[in-house]
Amino acid sequence: MYHKTKGIVLHTIKYSETSVIAKIYTEKLGLVSYIVKGVRSAKTSAKAALLQPLTLLEMEVSHRENKQLQFIKEFRRDYVYRSIPFDTLKSTVAIFLLELISKSIKEHEENGEMFDFIYESLCVLDRSENLNPDFHLLFLVHFTRHLGFVPHGNFSEKNAFFEMTEGMFIPQQSEMNVMSRNESRLLNELILANPFSDVPLKITRLERKQMMANLIRYYQLHLENFSLRSPEILEEILG
Protein backbone atom coordinates (compact mmCIF):
# COMPACT_ATOMS: atom_id res chain seq x y z
CA MET A 1 0.00 0.00 0.00
CA TYR A 2 1.36 3.44 -0.94
CA HIS A 3 1.28 6.48 1.33
CA LYS A 4 2.25 10.11 0.87
CA THR A 5 3.97 11.51 3.96
CA LYS A 6 6.53 14.01 5.10
CA GLY A 7 9.69 12.70 6.73
CA ILE A 8 12.77 13.76 8.68
CA VAL A 9 15.93 11.80 7.83
CA LEU A 10 17.74 10.60 10.97
CA HIS A 11 20.39 8.17 9.75
CA THR A 12 21.62 6.53 6.55
CA ILE A 13 23.90 3.51 6.03
CA LYS A 14 25.21 1.77 2.91
CA TYR A 15 23.22 -1.28 1.89
CA SER A 16 24.76 -2.41 -1.39
CA GLU A 17 26.83 -1.05 -4.25
CA THR A 18 24.16 1.50 -5.16
CA SER A 19 21.58 1.44 -2.35
CA VAL A 20 21.20 2.66 1.24
CA ILE A 21 19.00 2.06 4.25
CA ALA A 22 17.59 5.30 5.62
CA LYS A 23 15.97 5.61 9.03
CA ILE A 24 13.31 8.31 8.70
CA TYR A 25 10.84 9.72 11.19
CA THR A 26 7.62 10.16 9.22
CA GLU A 27 4.49 12.20 9.81
CA LYS A 28 2.03 9.40 9.11
CA LEU A 29 3.90 6.16 9.86
CA GLY A 30 6.24 6.98 12.74
CA LEU A 31 9.85 5.77 12.72
CA VAL A 32 10.55 3.65 9.63
CA SER A 33 13.63 2.13 7.98
CA TYR A 34 13.57 2.32 4.18
CA ILE A 35 15.61 0.67 1.45
CA VAL A 36 16.41 3.34 -1.12
CA LYS A 37 17.70 1.73 -4.29
CA GLY A 38 20.10 3.16 -6.84
CA VAL A 39 21.06 6.40 -5.06
CA ARG A 40 24.79 5.73 -4.72
CA SER A 41 25.62 5.68 -8.41
CA ALA A 42 27.37 8.63 -10.09
CA LYS A 43 24.20 9.53 -11.97
CA THR A 44 22.06 9.76 -8.82
CA SER A 45 24.37 11.62 -6.45
CA ALA A 46 21.80 14.44 -6.17
CA LYS A 47 19.26 11.95 -4.84
CA ALA A 48 21.77 10.67 -2.28
CA ALA A 49 22.25 14.24 -1.04
CA LEU A 50 18.56 14.33 -0.14
CA LEU A 51 19.16 11.61 2.46
CA GLN A 52 21.56 13.60 4.63
CA PRO A 53 20.56 13.70 8.33
CA LEU A 54 17.75 16.15 9.20
CA THR A 55 16.73 16.66 5.57
CA LEU A 56 12.99 17.39 5.44
CA LEU A 57 11.32 15.28 2.76
CA GLU A 58 8.06 14.82 0.94
CA MET A 59 7.76 11.10 0.11
CA GLU A 60 5.62 8.46 -1.50
CA VAL A 61 6.35 5.17 0.20
CA SER A 62 5.31 1.54 0.18
CA HIS A 63 4.28 0.30 3.60
CA ARG A 64 3.49 -3.25 4.64
CA GLU A 65 2.76 -4.13 8.25
CA ASN A 66 5.23 -6.36 10.11
CA LYS A 67 8.05 -5.69 7.63
CA GLN A 68 11.27 -4.30 9.09
CA LEU A 69 12.34 -2.63 5.85
CA GLN A 70 10.01 -0.60 3.64
CA PHE A 71 10.52 0.98 0.22
CA ILE A 72 10.47 4.59 -0.97
CA LYS A 73 8.88 5.08 -4.39
CA GLU A 74 9.55 8.82 -4.76
CA PHE A 75 11.05 11.53 -2.56
CA ARG A 76 11.96 15.18 -2.82
CA ARG A 77 13.08 17.96 -0.51
CA ASP A 78 10.11 19.52 1.29
CA TYR A 79 12.05 22.43 2.84
CA VAL A 80 15.42 23.80 1.75
CA TYR A 81 17.71 24.88 4.58
CA ARG A 82 19.08 28.35 3.89
CA SER A 83 21.32 28.96 6.90
CA ILE A 84 21.88 25.79 8.98
CA PRO A 85 24.54 24.30 6.63
CA PHE A 86 26.51 27.56 6.58
CA ASP A 87 26.22 28.73 10.21
CA THR A 88 28.54 27.06 12.75
CA LEU A 89 26.27 27.71 15.73
CA LYS A 90 23.10 26.57 13.99
CA SER A 91 24.74 23.46 12.54
CA THR A 92 26.04 22.55 16.01
CA VAL A 93 22.57 22.98 17.50
CA ALA A 94 21.20 20.84 14.64
CA ILE A 95 23.71 18.07 15.44
CA PHE A 96 22.57 18.20 19.06
CA LEU A 97 18.90 17.98 18.04
CA LEU A 98 19.66 15.08 15.69
CA GLU A 99 21.35 13.08 18.44
CA LEU A 100 18.61 13.91 20.95
CA ILE A 101 15.80 12.95 18.56
CA SER A 102 17.55 9.75 17.44
CA LYS A 103 18.17 8.62 21.02
CA SER A 104 14.65 9.51 22.20
CA ILE A 105 12.25 8.22 19.55
CA LYS A 106 11.71 4.48 19.62
CA GLU A 107 8.09 4.22 18.57
CA HIS A 108 6.95 3.14 15.13
CA GLU A 109 3.42 4.48 15.56
CA GLU A 110 2.18 7.74 14.08
CA ASN A 111 2.56 10.79 16.32
CA GLY A 112 1.62 13.79 14.24
CA GLU A 113 2.03 16.31 17.05
CA MET A 114 5.58 15.15 17.79
CA PHE A 115 6.45 15.23 14.10
CA ASP A 116 5.06 18.75 13.71
CA PHE A 117 7.02 19.97 16.75
CA ILE A 118 10.33 18.61 15.43
CA TYR A 119 9.65 19.83 11.89
CA GLU A 120 8.73 23.34 13.02
CA SER A 121 11.70 23.49 15.41
CA LEU A 122 14.10 22.78 12.56
CA CYS A 123 12.45 25.41 10.36
CA VAL A 124 12.58 27.99 13.17
CA LEU A 125 16.25 27.18 13.75
CA ASP A 126 16.94 27.72 10.06
CA ARG A 127 14.91 30.94 9.72
CA SER A 128 16.02 32.71 12.90
CA GLU A 129 18.14 35.79 12.30
CA ASN A 130 19.48 35.90 15.86
CA LEU A 131 19.35 32.45 17.39
CA ASN A 132 17.98 32.36 20.93
CA PRO A 133 20.82 31.01 23.14
CA ASP A 134 18.14 29.07 25.04
CA PHE A 135 16.77 27.39 21.90
CA HIS A 136 18.21 23.98 22.84
CA LEU A 137 16.84 24.23 26.40
CA LEU A 138 13.37 25.13 25.13
CA PHE A 139 13.48 22.17 22.77
CA LEU A 140 14.59 19.79 25.54
CA VAL A 141 11.77 20.90 27.84
CA HIS A 142 8.93 21.00 25.31
CA PHE A 143 9.99 17.76 23.60
CA THR A 144 9.09 15.96 26.85
CA ARG A 145 5.42 16.78 26.17
CA HIS A 146 5.55 14.42 23.21
CA LEU A 147 7.76 11.78 24.82
CA GLY A 148 5.39 11.27 27.75
CA PHE A 149 7.25 12.71 30.74
CA VAL A 150 6.39 16.41 30.70
CA PRO A 151 7.03 18.08 34.10
CA HIS A 152 3.90 18.27 36.26
CA GLY A 153 2.67 21.13 38.40
CA ASN A 154 4.02 24.65 38.70
CA PHE A 155 6.81 26.31 40.61
CA SER A 156 5.56 28.23 43.67
CA GLU A 157 6.72 29.26 47.13
CA LYS A 158 5.05 26.09 48.42
CA ASN A 159 6.43 23.79 45.71
CA ALA A 160 9.82 25.33 44.96
CA PHE A 161 11.90 22.27 44.05
CA PHE A 162 11.65 20.06 40.98
CA GLU A 163 11.98 16.35 41.69
CA MET A 164 13.17 14.67 38.48
CA THR A 165 12.28 11.04 39.17
CA GLU A 166 8.55 11.76 39.53
CA GLY A 167 8.73 14.81 37.29
CA MET A 168 6.97 17.24 39.60
CA PHE A 169 7.51 20.27 41.81
CA ILE A 170 7.67 19.43 45.53
CA PRO A 171 7.76 21.40 48.83
CA GLN A 172 11.28 20.54 49.97
CA GLN A 173 14.63 19.57 48.59
CA SER A 174 15.84 16.04 49.21
CA GLU A 175 19.25 14.60 48.36
CA MET A 176 18.64 12.77 45.08
CA ASN A 177 17.61 14.09 41.64
CA VAL A 178 16.13 17.37 42.84
CA MET A 179 16.88 20.75 41.29
CA SER A 180 17.72 23.72 43.48
CA ARG A 181 15.17 26.47 44.05
CA ASN A 182 16.74 28.70 41.40
CA GLU A 183 17.08 25.84 38.89
CA SER A 184 13.44 24.90 39.50
CA ARG A 185 12.35 28.51 38.91
CA LEU A 186 14.27 28.61 35.62
CA LEU A 187 12.78 25.28 34.56
CA ASN A 188 9.31 26.67 35.19
CA GLU A 189 10.13 29.68 33.00
CA LEU A 190 11.16 27.32 30.20
CA ILE A 191 7.95 25.32 30.60
CA LEU A 192 5.80 28.45 30.37
CA ALA A 193 7.74 29.99 27.45
CA ASN A 194 6.84 29.64 23.79
CA PRO A 195 9.17 26.89 22.52
CA PHE A 196 9.92 28.98 19.43
CA SER A 197 10.51 32.24 21.29
CA ASP A 198 13.45 34.38 20.20
CA VAL A 199 13.62 36.08 23.62
CA PRO A 200 16.33 34.55 25.85
CA LEU A 201 15.91 33.99 29.57
CA LYS A 202 17.83 36.28 31.90
CA ILE A 203 20.33 33.64 32.95
CA THR A 204 24.10 33.33 33.10
CA ARG A 205 26.28 31.01 31.03
CA LEU A 206 26.83 28.84 34.14
CA GLU A 207 23.08 28.60 34.82
CA ARG A 208 22.47 27.63 31.19
CA LYS A 209 25.14 24.94 31.40
CA GLN A 210 23.71 23.54 34.65
CA MET A 211 20.18 23.51 33.24
CA MET A 212 21.44 21.51 30.26
CA ALA A 213 23.00 18.98 32.64
CA ASN A 214 19.79 18.79 34.69
CA LEU A 215 17.60 18.24 31.65
CA ILE A 216 19.86 15.52 30.28
CA ARG A 217 19.72 13.84 33.68
CA TYR A 218 15.93 14.13 33.55
CA TYR A 219 15.89 12.36 30.18
CA GLN A 220 18.20 9.64 31.54
CA LEU A 221 15.77 8.96 34.35
CA HIS A 222 12.86 8.52 31.96
CA LEU A 223 14.39 6.94 28.85
CA GLU A 224 16.23 3.63 28.85
CA ASN A 225 19.92 3.70 27.85
CA PHE A 226 19.82 7.42 27.10
CA SER A 227 23.13 9.21 26.62
CA LEU A 228 24.42 12.08 24.48
CA ARG A 229 27.85 13.00 23.14
CA SER A 230 27.10 16.40 21.58
CA PRO A 231 26.29 18.68 24.60
CA GLU A 232 29.94 19.44 25.34
CA ILE A 233 30.50 20.58 21.75
CA LEU A 234 27.35 22.71 21.89
CA GLU A 235 28.40 24.34 25.17
CA GLU A 236 31.81 25.13 23.69
CA ILE A 237 30.22 26.83 20.67
CA LEU A 238 27.69 28.72 22.80
CA GLY A 239 30.55 30.07 24.91
Image (cartoon, rainbow, N blue to C red):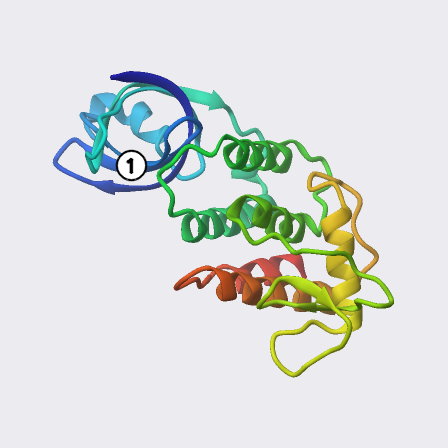
Nearer the observer, 115 or 130: 115
Estimate the x, y position of residue 235 in percent, counting from the top left: 61, 62
Mark 1 nearby-residue class (10 Å; few <14, some 14–19, many ≥20): many
| Residue 177 seen in the figure | yes
Estimate the x, y position of residue 222 in percent, counting from the top left: 50, 61
Identify the residue at horizontal 40%, vertical 21% (top origin).
Answer: 5
For the C terminus, the image quarter is bottom right
| Residue 204 seen in the figure | no
Identify the residue at horizontal 62%, vertical 47% (top origin).
Answer: 139
**Residue 120 in the figure: left or right of residue 15:** right
Q: Is residue 72 above or below residue 139?
A: above
**Residue 227 in the figure: left or right of residue 113:** left
Identify the residue at horizontal 84%, vertical 57% (top origin).
Answer: 202
Estimate the x, y position of residue 32 in percent, counting from the top left: 31, 35
Q: Which residue is mark 1?
A: 22
Q: Is residue 10 above or below residue 166?
A: above
Extreme right residue here? Answer: 157
Estimate the x, y position of residue 181 in percent, counting from the top left: 79, 71
Q: Secondary structure at mark 1?
A: strand
For the N terminus, the image quarter is top left
Q: Is residue 157 above or below residue 146?
A: below
Extreme bottom residue here? Answer: 175
Residue type of the residue flagged with mark 1: Ala
Nearer the observer, 108 or 85: 108
- In which quarter of the view is residue 51 placed? top left
**Residue 169 in the figure: left or right of residue 42:** right
